[in-house]
Amino acid sequence: MKLLHRCAVITGGASGIGEAIAVAFAEEGADVAILDIDEAKGAAVVKNLEAFGRKAYFICCDVGESAQVRSAFAEADRQLGGIDILVNNAGIIRLSRIVDMSEQEWDLILRTNLKSVFLCSQQAAQRMIEQGRGGRIICISSIHAVLSEPKAGHYTASKGGMEAFARTLASELAPYNITVNCIRPGAVSTALNAHLYTPAVKQATLARMAIKAIAVPEWIAPGAVFLASDDSRFMTGQQLTLDGGYIMDGSLPLGVTLGNE
C-alpha cells in the first residue's frame, strides 16, 4: 500500500497504459480520478477501481482545451479532497511523412500530447503548492523522444518537448517537494497502436530488443507506482526507460559482431 491516502489524477486513463496505471494505483491504496473523452470505457475502469475499495471518478475532459482542464481539475480536487499525483498519460499517434504532413495534423498531435502536459501540470502544481504536502508529476513519454520514428515527426517532437518541459518543471517545483519525472516506454501493444504491430514490424522490433517481447501496459504501470511513491523521493527531472533493452542495443544486425570474419 505504497500510495495509501494519496489522491491521483490520470489523463487518458480509460484504456491502455493509463488504465493499467489507474489499477496499479488503486491496488496500492490511492484514490483516482480519470480524465478522458471516452465515457463508456472510463465508467468501466471506475467500476473496476471501486472493487479495490478506493474512491474513483471519471471526468470527461479534452485535455488539450484549457477551459475543460481547469474545470476538470477543480472537480477532481473537490471529489478527491486534494491532488497528490498527476500522471500525464493522454496521447495519440498518426502516421505521415513530414513533407506530406498537414498543419492540422501537426497541431492535433502537439495539442494532445504536449500542450495537455502544460495545461494539466500547471493545474496540478498550483494545487500541490497550495496544499503544502509535496507531490508527484509523472509524464508518459516514449523512447522516440530520443530516437527517430519515420512518419511520426509530430509524435517524436511532442515526446521530446515533453521531456524538456518536465526537466524545467522539475527545477521550478523542487523547492515545494514536488518531483517531476518521465517514463519512456518502448514497444507496448495498446489499443492506440496495436494496428501498427504487423508481423513484419513485430519481427523487426524483437530482433532489435534484448528482451524478446512486446510489452503490455501492466509491465509499465509498476514504474509509475515507483515514481508516485516515496521510493522515488530523491529522483526528479529524470527518465525511467522501460523498453526491453531497445535503446541500449548497439549490436550489428544478423548476429554479426566486431571481429567476425
Image: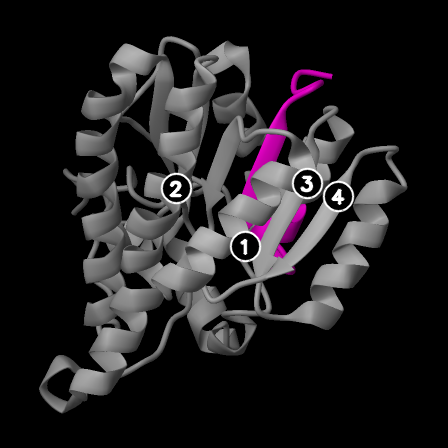
Q: CA distance from mark 2 to mark 3?
A: 15 Å
Q: Amino acid at mark 2?
A: Gln
10 Å crowding of disc 3: few (<14), some (14-19), many (20+): some
Q: CA distance from mark 2 to mark 1?
A: 34 Å
Q: Is residue 39 left or right of residue 60?
A: right
Q: Amino acid at mark 3?
A: Gln
Q: Is residue 117 left or right of residue 49?
A: left
Comes first in the chain, label 3 or label 4: 4
Q: CA distance from mark 4 to mark 2?
A: 19 Å
Viewer-side residue, 192 vs 121: 121
Q: Which residue is mark 1?
A: 214
**Residue at horizontal 23%, vertical 75%?**
107
Q: Which residue is mark 2?
A: 123
**Residue at horizontal 53%, vertical 63%?**
61
Comes first in the chain, label 1 or label 4: 4
Q: Which residues are magenta?
A: 1-20
Viewer-side residue, 130 vs 143: 130
Q: CA distance from mark 1 to mark 4?
A: 30 Å
10 Å crowding of disc 2: few (<14), some (14-19), many (20+): many
Magenta segment: does it hold 12? yes
Comes first in the chain, label 3 or label 1: 3
Q: Which residue is mark 3?
A: 79
Q: Is residue 135 above or below residue 49?
A: above
Comes first in the chain, label 2 or label 1: 2
Q: CA distance from mark 3 to mark 1?
A: 37 Å
Q: Amino acid at mark 1?
A: Ile
Which percent across, then down, holds residue 49?
80, 43
Can residue 216 be seen here? The reply is: no
Q: Amino acid at mark 4?
A: Ala
Viewer-side residue, 132 vs 88: 132
**Label 1 secondary element:** loop
**Label 3 secondary element:** helix
